[in-house]
Image: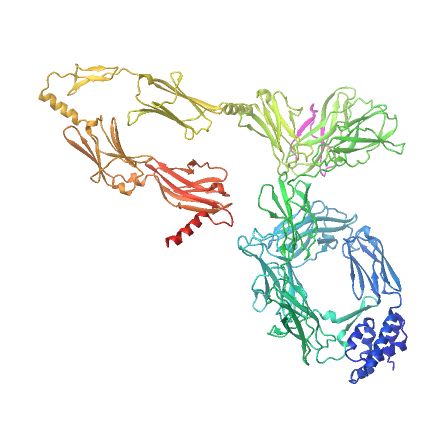
Amino acid sequence: MKTPDVAVCFKTVNCFYGVSTGSFIQLHTHRLKTPPPTQPALIGSFPSLLFPIRSLSGSPIVQGIRQMRSWKSLKSAEENCRQMKDFRELCARRAPMFWIPLRAHCVWERMSVTLTCTLGKITRITAAAFPAVLCKYQITKDCFPFKFSLIYRCSLEDSADYSVVVTNAFGQATSFANVLVKGEYVINALLPVYEGHFTSVMRPVFTREKESFTLSSSVSTSLERHGPSIQWFRDGVLLKESDRRKLSCIGCDVSLSGSPAYKEDEGLYTVVVASSSGLQEQSAYMFVKDAEPENIGAPGAPLCVRCHDIHKDCLLLSWTPPSDDRGSPVCGYYVERWDKSSNQWICCNEKPTKICRFPVSGLTEGETYRFRVKAVNQAGVSLPSKATKELRMTDHRKEERELVIPYDDQRKIVVDKADMEDIVDVPLPPTNVHASEISEDFIVLSWDEPKPRGKEPLTYYIQRSIAGSNSWQRIHLEKPVNSPRLPVFDLEKGKSYCFRVQAVNKYGLSDQSEPSGPISLQATLDVPPAPDHILALRDTKTSAVVQWGKVDCDPEILGYYIYSRLSGDSDWKSVNNKPLKCNRFTVPELETGKDYEFCVRAVNEAGLGAMSPISEPLNINEAIYCPSAPYDFTLLCCGKDEMTIGWKAPKFTAGKEILGYFLDQHDSSELNWKDVNNEPISKRVCKVTGLTEGHFYEFRGRAMNSAGVGKMSEPSGLFKCEEWTMAEPGPPYDARCTEVRNTSLMLHWEAPIYEGCSAITGYLVEAQKEGSDGWKNVNENPISECHLRISDLETGKSYQFRVTAVNSDGAGGPSVPCDPVVAATKPGTNEIEVGVDDEGLIFLSFENPEPTDNPKFIWSKDYKGAPDPEKTEISTEGNTSKLVLTNPSMEDVGTYSVEVPNTDGISASHTLTEEELADLMKKSHDVQHPLIKLISDWKKEVLENGDVRLWLQVEKLSPAAELDMILNDKIIENTPKRKIQFDRESGLIEIVKQDFGEEDKGTYTAKVVDGKASNQFNLTLVGEETTLTWSLDKKSIPNGQYDCQSGDGNLTIEKVNDHLHCNLNSCMLSLSASQLKCQGTAEGIKIYSDVKYFIEDMNPTWYHKNKKLDSTDRIKSGSTMNQIWLHIIGPTDTDKGLYTLEIFDGKDTHKRTLDLSGKGNQNIYSDRAKVVRGLPDLATIMVDKTLCLTCHISGDPAPEVSWVKNDKKVVFKDRYTLDVKGTVVTMTIEKICAEDSGRYSITVKNKYGSEVGQVTVSVFKHGEEPEELKKSVEKSPKQK
């Protein structure tokens, strides 16, 4: 019974497997009689027969047989199995074959290509691809078909023959294909071919999350008509325009811009333009930094969130840990999903998950979801990661239940496997129950659907039991599971569990599956170990290459993060925020001349690994390379058998000095080149001898530096060897430009080697501006010097210059033009600094703006060579050179210039005029012979105890300052009766002399020396004749006597009468004291009364509020010759009130009073310097923080403020700053450290008094508890 469909199928099987039609019919007859338990296994044994079975499934015979419910005996079933086994062996006993072989491909350069072949049923496959480059090729194997894929962009070297060899026990089959890669890629043949080229280098881009970014480059001609020929790639993946990413081409600018930026956008970007000369490209790396966190110290956001193992109601999320944990390790992650109905983000996990994988269940089939992740550390929660794309929950395993059979040209047949199965009512039990994901917090339980599955939708019930027991409990009670996956969270660590599953459809419930093996939560995943062999190498002036050893671990690493810091710093900065797959990376945007350190950390799903060993400090500068080739060879002079050749230095020297040149010559009549010199030539001029007159020669050369010998130059033009006899001079050579600025430059050249028949009288300079055709004279009259400053240039324009020598016979030939130079001042250009240093020396200094290793500076004066070494001294320190005028005079007037060779034309000059030099010489004298400044000249006073005090004040001096005190040309020393004090901090000098007498009179000289500064100050105390006159009632009494030696005066009264007694009593009263007065002092308040002359018989007594006062440490009383005083130190409100002074005149008591209640003497209290409020008793702070001590002060006039730490005056510099704004005083200590702990005191002082405020500062380390807080905690329980 052959229907037409069956006949076609039989023919197909006969063609591919060599089985007769009769055998096939017999085979199917036996198959249809096989009992159900055997049937699935038999179908699985014939995957190659699924195609013919699908064709038979609709025939009347098959439908009738499927409805039969009676089956033959077991013996018949065994016979069927035996026959089918024989048939399989029959099919396998042949060599493999290709249903669809490889086909040839022709692709453009940098396109991807896929080689595909379709195979029959075979035993073993061996695939060989030639050439084999593992990093560019990827082999994939499927049941249908077998694929061999080239996944990266092709290059010209990939053009080759490729072959696939398949083998089994009975032979092998081979398929060949040719791949041709073409170098010219024209997108559209109708478009004109692009003829331009890139004119700028695409620079690295640094942006931050949520900000915009732009990568751009420029080309020489417009690209607007060639838009389809421009392609952008990121890490080799072609980029398309999207809502967030825009590709533009406007005029000569091509750019890629986007907003907002995410860390996933980080990578190497490449723009490719197809042109007539092939594909041109520019590449640059874009770095995306973490956004500023909402919580200070919170980690950066995770990145690269992806969905895996997607089913109807669950999926598995994975992500990458952030590079920057901001000093606190990440302890977990929160997963959030977008709820479309409530328009909110909902957290999926109550507790943070510790690894970067998390199963999300409980989703609804047909709904659309997005997911994002947040990281957590001790400081808080990070910003969310970039959300995933919208994902619709469908049965993504549907494709696995379909069989796709390709045939013909890109056609295929799709067969649903359910159509090929028997009718299923009650489902069979699931199989292969196992854990597909195991972590320390959860497992993901997985199983296979029943086979046959049937067409009805399936759900599942899951049970678990502790391993070893037979007590089963159902889990996930809410509703049946729709997918063959289930995350299980509530498991105990240390216990093993077994699971089993039942399938359910509308017809009923299956039997229980076979239990799984024991499953338990696994131990914590290990973070990857530290990479080793880290090495930092120089690359450019602003970049370095970092490489390290690869890390192999389980789980597999996701990549590497690089960190950098300046040597000496403690904080590391993330270089990349998206893990690198490679183990070598170029770190850009570093500071030239600075020392950097690098380290690397590997990252996997468990988090950031240990930090690698720190690299050796690397000074950022140009790597050492061999120089480029010399160029512009020219003939400078020629004799009968010799030539003098000159050339220009290499454009690229890698910052290293050219040590010499090697020159080759070639006679045009010969084949081989010959060496001119075996030893390097130091100059760029060489006389080549031993030539043949009349022959033509060409030359080439190579330069050498400390890295080695560079590339060979291109050959020069042909020069004929014939003697020069012309009267005019030969060409000058080595024309070059220095001191290039916006509108001017300095042109230099060398005099011709051949002068002609007469001496050279001058030079003419010509210029050619960019865009012009001819040369124009710069100077009308010849100049005698070999240099010329050219001004009035147009900023931004390119110029070339050449020079012609002139003698009495005329002008000779022009020199080779100098290299094109743009009139523009380069950013960072430095000029020569002129001044006077601390030693009083006049100097000219220049700093190289492009730091290099051991730079060389060439100084010259008036462009005629190095300055006179007897009058100048040149020194170099780091990247700075200093020229000092050792014996300055007007002969030093002139132009000083400096060049830094082996750089990009770094040079400068300065013209020193007579006026400027005279001013510098005056400043030099002032510095070399400084005078100590006088603040207050000599003062004289008599102290309360009768001592004489002489004092003066100068400016603040250093601790090394010295004082010589001289009296009448003799040095006097400090003695108990003559105390000499010298306070260098305040500059106070004083002499206190007891019993001042004639021997103490004369001229006092204070000679002060402080380093180079000095000064002397004189005071003359001259003795005068003293007279004593006695009088009565204002009438002179002639009988008085006076002894000038002893100072005693006597008056003898022979007879005393009433009139005389009255006058003597009046004299006594005249000694009465004045009214009490009040005066503020530095220590407090002074109350005093002035008297004409004080004698002890006055017996002064002080009272406060009618209470007698005794002398104490705080309240002191005393008197001088003309004053009686009371000194209150540190007055308080209790010291206010009525003060009384009683004085006895021998007969009566006299009182003088003063009320200090604040009414009449308010300024004594209100205007006195005080610390009002603000300072605490104790201030505790953690290291590396900033401490601000603020207090409010008062006083009129405004008080002087000073701070003391542990009895030592605080010097405000570096980290210490003082800010006084009105009545608010703030002392700030930045980056505080343990050494800053101590007792701090602020002293405020004005003419009414002073006051001191104190605070104790305690500095503790991170993670520690301050000792003062510990003590307070310990005291508090005791007090309770």
View extreme (left): residue: 1058
Nearer-the-camera pick, 910 or 984: 984
Residue 153 image point, x, y percent? 77, 54
Question: Quarter of the image holding residue 984?
Answer: top left
Q: Is residue 1071 magenta?
A: no
Q: Which quadrant would residue 96 be assigned to in this image?
A: bottom right
- Can I make out residue 183 in this image? no
Task: Please name the residue shown 85% across and 23% down the image.
Answer: 640
Q: Which image quadrant is residue 31 in?
A: bottom right
Horizontal side of 721 relative to 942 (left or right) equals right
Quadrant where the N terminus sits is bottom right
User: Which residues make up the magenta segment?
Assistant: 764-793
Q: Nearer the viewer, residue 147 or 1274?
A: 1274
Image x and y of residue 1093, in percent? 22, 25
- Residue 1112 is left or right of residue 1058, and the answer is right
Rendered view: 630 above or below 992: below
| Magenta-span inclusion, residue 768 | yes
Count how many numbered circles sit on residues in the image. 0
Q: Is residue 725 visible?
A: yes
Q: State the image coordinates of residue 492 (x, y, percent, origin top left).
A: 59, 66
Q: Is residue 186 left or right of residue 1033?
A: right
Please name the colour scheme applied to the rendered image: rainbow
* Residue 491: % across, % down: 60, 67
What type of secondary structure mainly makes up the magenta span? Answer: loop
In the rendered image, the vertical position of residue 875 relative to residue 366, given as above or below: above
Say which residue appears at 70% left-offset and 56% top-offset. Answer: 239
Q: Quadrant of the C terminus?
A: bottom left
